[in-house]
Image (spheres, rainbow, N blue to C red):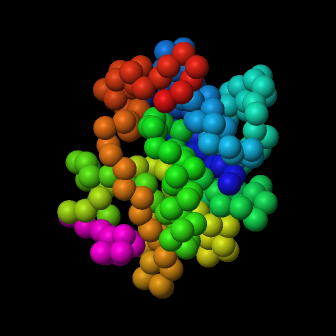
Amino acid sequence: MEGFILAAGLGTRLRPLTDDRPKALVEVRGVTLLELAIRKLERAGIGHIVINVHHFADKIIDFVGSRKWQASIDISDERTLLLDTGGGLKHAAPLFSGKHNVLVHNVDILSDIDLQALEGRHKADGNLVTLCVSRRQTKRLLAFDKEGLLVGRADEGLAFSGISVVAPELFALLPEADHPYPVIDEYIRLSHEGRRIGSYLHTPDRWLDVGKPETLALAGQYVTPNCSC
């Protein structure tokens, strides 16, 4: 399995912290969100990681180059145009081998989700995409059928948790990366075309979106000195 860390966002909810740095370099107990994400993927056995960049891109590139990592790391450069989650994934496609599943992980998510178990479910179910989801309050909910397959958006349903596994076949099915677009809309489209967009239900107890100040303040309890979360 290879990895893709979404780190290109503007981090507007974390201002003023992101006035002089990207969200990916905001720290929790002295460790950047980007390092926490990279180390988590490395612990899952991922040996190649792609990171997309836009906001303060040079700072992320310099940070990556200043550390020693177990995984090899490539940069998907979106400095010209921020491409959103879908366009960003498509833009990064040439940097992957095309032979392995790709773990897609938002840089601002901390969790104890077992990434190897997630890929195991993805393979066992034969999915094109497997989305980590949980039952929690959010304005954006997704509906799944009895088999756990995505059918669309809903007023009542499950919330996407910012972590997923995608098969390499997905990249050819996405629109070109000449404009920004959200990937969830494409997953809904593909599900209506009969593609398997599955779900992996986890407990929200050890999951945190640290993309806003009130949750960033809680993040320290998820991080230990050895960068685990």
Q: Residue at x 69, y 45 (%)?
A: 46
- Above or below, 225 against 32 in this view is above
- Above or below, 88 against 98 in this view is above
Q: Quadrant of residue 100?
A: bottom right
Q: Quadrant of residue 210?
A: top left
Residue 214 seen: yes
- Front-lying residue, 151 or 85: 151
- Front-lying residue, 49 or 222: 222
Residue 11 seen: no
Q: Residue at x 43, y 54 (%)?
A: 132
Q: Residue at x 75, y 30 (%)?
A: 69
Quadrant where the image shows the N terminus: bottom right
Q: Count all numbered tags in the image, as a single digit.
A: 0
Q: Is residue 188 left or right of residue 62?
A: left
Q: Position of residue 154 (x, y in %)?
A: 25, 67
Q: Residue furthest left?
A: 156
Q: Position of residue 15 (x, y in %)?
A: 42, 26
Q: Residue furthest bottom?
A: 193
Q: Residue at x 66, y 72 (%)?
A: 169
Residue 149 colored magenta? Answer: yes
Q: Position of residue 4 (x, y in %)?
A: 64, 49
- Front-lying residue, 98 or 213: 98
Residue range of the region highlighted in magenta in the rendering: 143-155
